[in-house]
Image: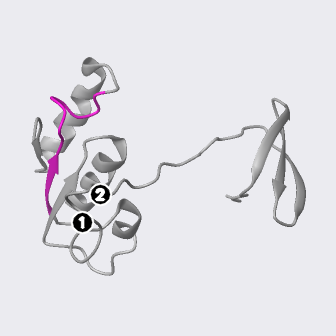
Amino acid sequence: VKTVQGWATFRDGKTVEVETEIGTQVIRAETVVLATGPAPVELPFLPFGGPVISSTEALALGDVPKKLAVVGGGYIGLELGMAFAKMGSKVTVVEALPRVLAQYDAELTRPVLKRLGELGVEVMTGA
């Protein structure tokens, strides 16, 4: 995978022109993935620092924590929660909305909830 950062425009369905710091790059590919990426959101009552870390920082941990609370039941929070549960952490996902993956159809999220349960991940909604 080659990551290119800059401002991109599509010439056609298989060609992207990217304005980078060092000039224009033209990239041709059979398949193009747009990964604009989310940015971690720091909550006013739960600022980053000490034991409170962002999802980016969670990916750089040197050791697997024994217990981990994931704030947010979107796809990134659930991916992190599942990964850490598979590595042995006791994971609790805390979501303010009535259900996790709220932007998706509830029927489609049932297999995800089933897998979370199989991994021992506790899910707290409306919290």
Q: Which residue is drawn at 34% across and 26% down?
A: 103
Residue 103 got which mark? none
Q: In this view, does 50 lie above or below 92?
A: below
Q: Read off the magenta span.
A: 90-102
Residue 9 spot, x, y in % from top left: 81, 39
Q: Residue at x 81, y 29 (%)?
A: 13
Residue 87 got which mark? 1
Q: Quadrant of residue 75?
A: top left
Mark 2 = which residue?
83
Q: Is the magenta stretch mostly helix, strand or loop?
A: loop
Say whether residue 26 is magenta: no
Q: Are marks 1 and 2 in contact (CB under 8 Å)?
A: yes
Q: In which quarter of the image is residue 74?
A: top left
Local secondary structure at mark 2: helix
Residue 108 spot, x, y in % from top left: 30, 22
Q: Is residue 48 above or below residue 95?
A: below
Say whether residue 96 is magenta: yes
Q: Which of 1 and 18 is in front in this view?
A: 18
Q: Which residue is drawn at 17% across and 39% down?
A: 96
Mark pair 1, 2: CA separation: 6 Å
